[in-house]
Image (cartoon, rainbow, N blue to C red):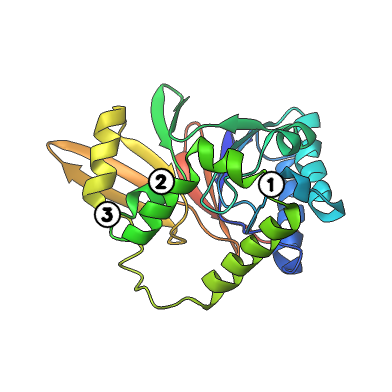
Amino acid sequence: MIDAVFISDLHLHPNEPLITSRFNSFVNWALNNTRSVYILGDFFHAWPGDDALDEWSCGIAMQLASLAKKGINLYFMHGNRDFLLGSRFWTLAQVTFLSEPTVITLDNMKVLLVHGDRYCTKDTSHQWLRRVTRNPIFSTVFLKLPFSFRQKLVNSIRQHSQLNTSKSPSYMDVVPATLLHHMQQMDVKTLVHGHTHKPGLTQHQYQGSLYRHFVLSDWDDNPLLLCYDNPNGFYFRLFLEY
């Protein structure tokens, strides 16, 4: 049995049925293979507020709830696309919300969890938008706007992100110095994050210590699951639909 599985960046959307199918298959697999699931943001491709709950998204919530009813621990952290996901969805899905950053402990090892975009500091326009949208005042004001307007806005942002290829990958990647500084601040040597869609392990020798950070996969094709168990520690596992 796997102690914990970490995923992010599914970008679920009703117009992406293949990804929804992969998620449903993942739930069926997780029911019998893990004790905990951590979702580190961008679970939905865009979310204008919990009044967006409809038959499709309620079905997603029910899938998560089926894991919780089996006794599997579910945790969720906001990403840059679903930061408006709120208590109505959490309650329906039976998910525990994690603030960013969060430090968990796995077999006496402290592990830092973040979505990951905070480290992409070369992308100054994104960092500005992140500061604005993560401000509680923004969420309060934005959610008072008419739903139809919010829906059109997030859909336009989704379309823009799909067409925008002007920024180079290196420009949008994490900056190691920013990442390592934050790890030192949080007093951890292990980090798990998503956002960049570049799955794998990177290790850093920094000021006499070894730091490592695991990047999670997106779900466009065959996703990689980051798993943790004792005695194997962290490892990536290719997820194939069942």
In the picture of the structure, the residue carrying the numbered disc 1 is 49
Q: Where is residue 26 shown, x and y percent of the image?
A: 71, 51
- Find numbered disc 2 in the image and state the secondary structure of the residue it sits on: helix
Q: Earlier in the sequence, mark 2 or mark 3?
A: 2
Number of residue marks: 3
Task: For marks 1 and 3, give the one nearer the viewer.
Answer: 1
Whole-angstrom CA distance, mark 2 to mark 1, is 19 Å
In the picture of the structure, the residue carrying the numbered disc 3 is 175
Q: Residues within 10 Å of mark 1 (few under 14, many from 20)?
A: many
In the image, farthest residue toward the left: 207
Q: Amino acid at mark 1?
A: Gly
Quarter of the image for the C terminus: give it. bottom right
For image coordinates 57% across by 45% down, the residue present is 83
Q: Residue 158 versus residue 225: which sits nearer the camera? A: 158
- Find numbered disc 3 in the image and state the secondary structure of the residue it sits on: loop
In this rendering, would 86 be left or right of 194?
right
Q: Is residue 189 above or below residue 107?
A: below
Whole-angstrom CA distance, mark 2 to mark 3, is 18 Å
Q: Where is residue 14 shown, x and y percent of the image?
A: 76, 63
For image coordinates 51% across by 32% down, the residue present is 99
Whole-angstrom CA distance, mark 1 to mark 3, is 31 Å
Residue 139 visible (yes or no): yes
Q: Where is residue 236 shown, x and y percent of the image?
A: 50, 51
Q: Is residue 6 above or below residue 239?
A: above
- Find numbered disc 1 in the image and state the secondary structure of the residue it sits on: loop
Q: Residue 104 versus residue 12: which sits nearer the camera? A: 12
In the picture of the structure, the residue carrying the numbered disc 2 is 131
Q: Where is residue 169 shown, x and y percent of the image?
A: 36, 70
Q: Earlier in the sequence, mark 2 or mark 1?
A: 1
Q: Could you tell me if the residues under marks 2 and 1 are in contact, i.e. CB atoms within 8 Å?
A: no
In this rendering, would 141 be left or right of 13?
left
